[in-house]
Image (cartoon, rainbow, N blue to C red):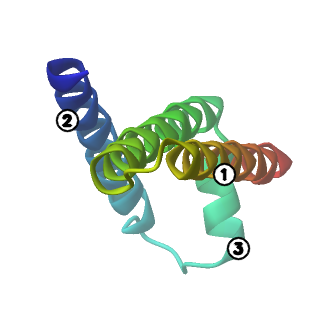
Amino acid sequence: YGSRDWLSQRVTALLMALFTLVLVVQVLMPGAVGYYKWAGIFSAQWMKLLTYVVIVSLIWHAWVGMRDIWMDYVQPVGVRLVLQVVTLAWLIGCAGWALQVLWRL
């Protein structure tokens, strides 16, 4: 897993950093910051697609990090498997919720 995981962590972190920069630039545009501005930012199809990519990147980034923590610090195989399954279920649930919120705007 070594170098592939290292590279995936860096690529997903870069995508999240670029998304944050795009979002900050849009928020700093003139106008009051409120619901309508946020809804306007995320109403464009390109922003929804970019947000979708970042949500998937965030989930992958978190999974690689948590999987490595479980593999490094939890020795009993059964406990490690349960923790990995719970982590994966939690991350998939969070991704589903985030996408539901995104496409509801």
Q: Name the residue under label 1.
A: 86
Q: Classify 71 as above or below 83.
A: above
Which amino acid lies under the numbered mark 3 shown in the image of this protein? Tyr
* Discs 3, 2 touching: Cβ within 8 Å: no
Secondary structure under the numbered disc 3 in the rendered image? helix
Q: What residue is shown at x 54% (from left), y 42% (from top)? A: 55
Quarter of the rendering occupied by the N terminus: top left
Q: Nearer the viewer, residue 2 or 33?
A: 2
**Mark before the other along the chain sequence, 1 or 3:** 3
Disc 1 crowd rating (10 Å Cα; few below 14, some 14-19, many 20+) is few
Q: Mark 2 points at which residue?
A: 10
| Numbered mark located on residue 99 in the image | none
- What is the distance, in whole Å, between disc 3 and disc 2 at their CAs? 32 Å
Residue at the disc numbered 3:
35
Judged by depth in the image, the label closer to the viewer, 2 or 1, is 1
Residue visible at 66% across and 55% down?
40
Q: Quadrant of residue 20?
A: bottom left
In-image side of 28 versus 89 (left or right): left
Q: In this view, does 33 lie above or below 80?
A: below
Q: Earlier in the sequence, mark 3 or mark 2?
A: 2
- Measuring from the top left, give residue 82's x and y in whole percent: 63, 48
Q: Does 14 sit left or right of 40 as displayed?
A: left
Tell me which amino acid carries mark 2: Arg
Q: Nearer the viewer, residue 35 or 65?
A: 65
